[in-house]
Image (spheres, rainbow, N blue to C red):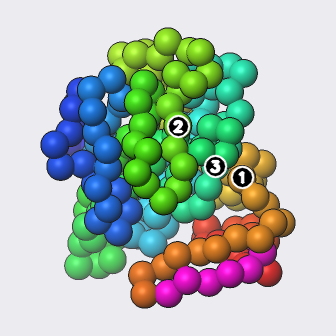
Amino acid sequence: PAGTLVWARVQTAGRGRQGRNWFSPAGNFYASLILRPALPVATAAQLGFVAAIAVADACLALAPEAAISLKWPNDVLLSGRKLAGLLLESQSRGDGMLDWLVLGIGINLATYPTDIEYPATALAATGADATAEAMLSALAASFLVWYEGWRDGAGFATIRAEWLARAQGLNQPIRVRLPGETRDGVFAGLDIDGALLLG
């Protein structure tokens, strides 16, 4: 049912965007949330931004002084280093409406990988003693607020503005890696559907 959350203390086959492995030792936070909003699949993609804001708020609830920012399309950063990643997987019905969406969330609380291209960190770097249980509680509360606001009337304009207020590197040079190509430009913002705008 919608709202079902699966929480793991360890993952043996965690994965991120474009099928990359996700480092999943004990001590960090790993969860998948099943959602079924009555929306077209393309609109449901906005949930990545909703979730990023909710994760940022949950991290700040546990580490109020943390320098948290957001990186397009699905990362949460701490002092410019990767702290959390999000993965959306969905299936549509024959009419183009969403059948289901699974939101995967991985947050480095205690440990992080050192052998990846983008530098990573963990919430423990702030001095916070954040447990997976505490993160689950904080994230459940923050996600509910942002999800219900988005679903029940605030729409994407509010989410877009909030995400951009927390964005890393706005109006600065950026390199975007897409399947099969890389593009360089200036991060000019998000369009009304959440696509990254290159200047």
- The structure residue drawn at horizontal position 61% and vertical position 67%, both measured from the top left corner, is 194
Quarter of the figure that contains the C terminus: bottom right
Say which element carries label 2: loop
Q: Which residue is mark 2?
A: 121
Few, some or many C-alpha atoms within 10 Å of disc 1 (few <14, some 14-19, many ≥20)? some
- The structure residue drawn at horizontal position 48% and vertical position 59%, both measured from the top left corner, is 117
Say which element carries label 3: strand
Q: Give the numbered dot on residue 15.
A: none
In the displayed structure, does residue 187 sit left or right of residue 61? right
Amino acid marked by disc 3: Leu
Whole-percent x and y of residue 162? 72, 47
Query: Taking 50 as reference, is 187 above or below it?
Result: below
**Do tag 1 and tag 3 residues touch (Cβ < 8 Å)?**
yes
Residue 4 seen in render: no
Q: Which residues are magenta?
A: 181-186
78 in the magenta segment:
no
Quarter of the figure that contains the N terminus: top left
Q: Main secondary structure of the magenta part?
A: strand
Q: Give the numbered dot on residue 70.
A: 3
Q: Give the numbered dot on residue 167.
A: 1
Which numbered disc, 1 or 3, marks the residue that appears first in the sequence? Answer: 3
